[in-house]
Image: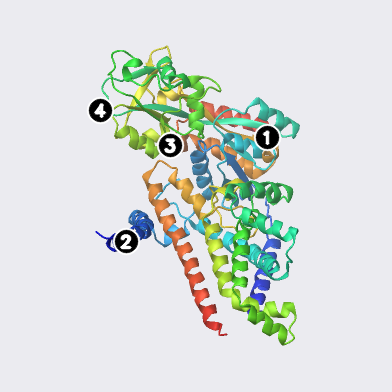
Amino acid sequence: MKNLALTLVALFTLAAVSCGSKQESKKTGNTTLSGDIKIDGSSTVYPITEAIAEEYRSEQTEVRVTVGVSGTGGGFKKFYRGETDINDASRPIKSKEIKICEENGISYVGLSVAYDGLAVLKNPANDWLTSITVEELNKLWVPQAQDSIMYWNQIREEWPNEEIHLYGPGVASGTYDYFAEVICGKKVGTRGDYTASEDDNVLVQGIATDKYALGFFGLAYYEENKDKLDLVSVDNGNGAVFPSMETVSSGEYAPLSRPIFIYVSNKAAEKPEVVDFVNFYLNSAGDIAKEVGYVALPVEEYQVEIDKFDAFVKK
Amino acid sequence: MNKVQINRIKDKSFGVLGLIATLSGLIILGFFIGQILHEGLNRLDMDFLKDLPSRKPEKAGIYTAWVGTLWILVMTTLFAFPLGVAAGIYLEEYAKKSKLSSLLEINISNLAGVPSIIYGLLGLEIFGRVMHLGNSLLAGSLTLALLILPIIIVATREAVRAVPNSLRMASYGLGASKWQTIWNQILPASMGGIFTGVILAISRAVGETAPLIVVGALAYVPFAPSGPMDEFTVLPIQIFNWISRPQHGFAVNAAAAIIILLGITFIMNGIAVYLRNRWQKKINW
């Protein structure tokens, strides 16, 4: 018993000592920077931020970059409390969030870093579907379609009289929000009788084994599964557009592609390590975006963002 | 067929049913473990344990995750063990039967059933925001300590109650005070049970993800924590993060990380069994 008590006391002391010994060393020179950079926010932006943070490790070894995944909205909640330096966002900041930022005295700059695209997908054995219009997608996915639009030929007459099986991400994902908003309208949501999974592998497997399937998920994930699924062109009234790096970055593949952002707060921009990191981010985002499956902005666009950030830092 | 034969058949069939019930859990567990081992065992090597997180699955490792898990484990124990055992002893040995003590008892049993995410929200507000601990190891481990406290209290009470009353009487008879009796007789006699309860509770804490996500454990942490105020990640979060990636390489990584997590849990349970046996041997009344 005595030994146990002694051990406990020793452990407590140890914990207390290590508690006190944590030091913030901060050198501000041109070459070595140090300090912490806290990033949180969208799971959509996470892969690209993670990749850049990883590359940055070899650039500035003393700077500790951490990345969380709270979702765009959850991230902004921390951002406007001043708990994070940078927020990953898969949509522009909302007016409600802007208001709270103002109340808390936090100003910020939003920088677009890449494009994210949604892909509409079918089984390779499906030979009747090559393109679909936004109206048809709307007719198929709106909540009213539940239990009424059940067959392919209800969407277009020449399509087969077979049941249609729908696949898509779960309602908690940013991808779902994005699809629901551009296809069905704001705050409407979609029908509920589709196979929903947060795990894109489940969706890939589902569509790949079902001839009468139709689904959607991030274009980035399609790149990983090219051999199992086929893309569908989307027609928004100006002719069918096949999703590709070119049509996404030119904005032709609308409405199913969108820019993704990082938001930097004014307090964070006072720290040299954050300034250095954000510049590194914008300079390498083009290459990294392709690597992790996003679509890069045109080169001159990155320069525009860098200038925008420069102006913000000087202010 | 007479009644005796029917009863005999009933008897036999219940035995078979019981065997199936017992095996079903084990078979499914065995199947999962087999699959995980098949998928992840080849990925396990020293580099996997030493590498930092990466976007390339073959370069990614779990160094920061297992170090974070170890920190959480030690700190959670430091908070939960003394508090839980003290509370258990108080309720069993000191508390008089009163409205207050029965209210306490009901609340503790209820707390044991509260979903862990609720503890996460509580931890975020109290430890993270009010006490300004942020998303540190300290906030995380305090939250988990709260989560497992009821389990430890219940286990302690069970263990203390199992000590025969004659032992207490004998101790008092020799002139020992209440505290002396507890410290010298009851605690040593019930330590096996208490340890078992504590370790099982901590094994549960090691696998928890939800409360830590709420408190703010991160997905990407490229450094091992050096103190209780550092940000952190833990194995379950790393696994969750990898599972949700589309690339197959990350699924393999997740399987390998699961093997490590299972290993930690098995080792903890092993220690619990060992301690129970050791303390039981020591006691000879």
Residue B280 position in % (x across, y down): 53, 79
Task: Judge depth for marks 3 and 2 and give the one in front.
Answer: 2
Name the residue at 55% across, 83% down.
B282
Identify residue for label 1.
A313
A314, A191: nearer the viewer: A191
Rounded to the nearest angstrom, the CA distance separating label 1 from label 3 is 41 Å
Mark 4 and mark 2 residues within 8 Å of each other at the beta carbon? no
Rounded to the nearest angstrom, the CA distance separating label 1 from label 2 is 86 Å
Amino acid type indicated by mark 3: Ser
First in residue order: circle 1 vs circle 4: 4
Q: Is residue A128 left or right of residue B120?
A: left
Rounded to the nearest angstrom, the CA distance separating label 1 from label 4 is 54 Å
Element class at badge 1? helix
Mark 1 and mark 4 residues within 8 Å of each other at the beta carbon? no
Q: Which mark is residue A197?
A: 3
Labels 1 and 3 within one chain: yes
Q: Is residue B229 visible?
A: no
Identify residue for label 4.
A125
Residue A150 position in % (x across, y down): 36, 21
Circle 2 Cα neighbour tier, 10 Å, few/some/many (<14 / 14–19 / ≥20): few
Q: Chain of mark 4?
A: A
Residue A63, placed above or below residue B188: above
Circle 1 Cα neighbour tier, 10 Å, few/some/many (<14 / 14–19 / ≥20): some
Rounded to the nearest angstrom, the CA distance separating label 4 from label 2 is 59 Å
Identify residue for label 2.
B7
Task: Judge depth for marks 1 and 2 and give the one in front.
Answer: 2
Task: Judge depth for marks 3 and 4 and give the one in front.
Answer: 3
B63, B80: nearer the viewer: B80
